[in-house]
Amino acid sequence: MLTRRHWLATVPAVAASQALVSIPLLGLHRSAAAAAPRVISVGGALTELIYAMGAQADLVGVDSTSLFPAEATRLPNVGYARTLAAEGLLSLAPTMIVATEEAGPPAVLNQLQSARIPLHVLRADHRFEGVVDRTRRLGELMDRPAQARALIDGLQQAWAQTQQTVSRVSAGHRPPRVLFVLSNAGNQARISGRATAADAMIRYAGAVNALGEVQGYQALSPEAAIAAAPDVILATSQGVEAVGGADALLRLPGLAQTPAARQRRVVSLETMEMLGFGPRLPQALAKLATALHAGAMG
């Protein structure tokens, strides 16, 4: 088992797409095809979906972002999705690897192809429809189509209820301006523009991304934070903990001069819950919208 690394969300800006990309591999031996499934999941949201459809018995390994449910943390860990090592993956004798587009580096993916390990890369899509597409595809890959369909039905019902919650809590006042801060102890904090998972969640919650004119992530600078003038600072709970708490977060360059700091308005959710776009998305959005709009001024 590889050593689990402490992980804070690093979510890249990607273009939304419903498509799924698979890397087909020819020449899979009959013995491997007939063997009991041995699946490695690279991506916390994919791991959550596999558990949610009851296919966790097929898992033999996960990456370091697979922190939920807690049982997933007891599986062999193959490391961080972007810095995989072929040796660690192959040592688990997988019959299939499912991953997100964050998986890498490319040289390792090429090694897996050379080893004739079926690798299926599901395209990132920071929309509810993307969660549905990934669920359906995982159901096909893991021979659980009925379970995937049932999960999709439940997700769609929950999503409809969440939309009602967002409409209710956002009514009667101007949308709050929200600045997402991705902080990591010892590293430069970053703030999130459009085409990111954080931006999608802010918009879904009926709020305004205070950095919406910027593409992707950028380093936090006092000037940018002050100009953004956020009503709320949004962060991951792991990020808040890493910098020493909400007070320390608000002391980051420029944040102390924002309306959010003056009102001491910091909202945080667990990283994969908020940014993973997995099966917890409806509940996460309801929590986020309620927190962002609490105490909003007209």
Image: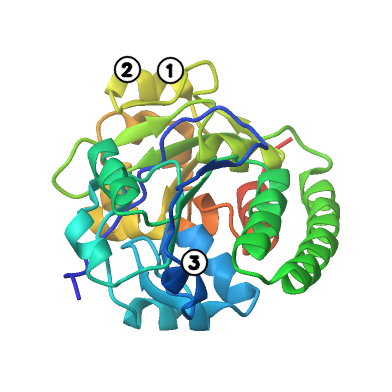
Does residue 119 appear to the left or right of 18 in the view shown? Answer: left
Q: Looking at the rendered structure, which numbered label has been put on residue 274?
A: none
Q: Where does the image place residue 25, in percent across and percent down from the top left? A: 45, 47
Which of the marked residues, 1 or 3, is nearer the chain's N terminus?
3
Q: Observer-nearest residue: 171 or 16?
A: 16
**What's the distance in space between the residues labelled 1 and 3, CA to CA?**
39 Å
**Quarter the C terminus occupies:** top right
Q: Are marks 1 and 2 in contact (CB under 8 Å)?
A: yes
The dot on residue 227 is 1
Crowding around mark 2 (Cα neighbors within 10 Å: few <14, some 14 to 19, many 20+) is few
**Going 28% across and 72% down the picture, which residue do you hit?**
92
Task: Tell me where residue 158 sits by quadrant.
Answer: bottom right
- Helix, strand or loop under label 3: helix
Q: Which residue does the image show at 27% across and 55% down from the upper left?
A: 80
- Tell me which amino acid carries mark 3: Thr
Label 1 to label 2: alpha-carbon separation: 6 Å
**Looking at the image, is 213 positioned above or below residue 29?**
above
The residue drawn where x is 62% and y is 80% is 54
Question: What amino acid type should be assigned to the residue bearing mark 2?
Answer: Glu
> Picture coordinates of residue 177 (x, y %)?
58, 32
Q: Mark 3 to mark 2: distance in Å? A: 39 Å
Amino acid at the residue labelled 1: Ala
In x, y percent, where is residue 276?
Answer: 51, 53
In the rendered structure, find residue 47 and report the number of the disc placed on it.
3
Q: Please name whichever residue, 236 or 264, is drawn nearer the observer in this view of the structure.
A: 236
For the point 25% across and 31% down, the residue is 253
* Residue 37 higher or lower than 175, as above or below: below
Q: Secondary structure at mark 1?
A: helix
Secondary structure at badge 2 equals: helix
Write down the residue under mark 2: 223
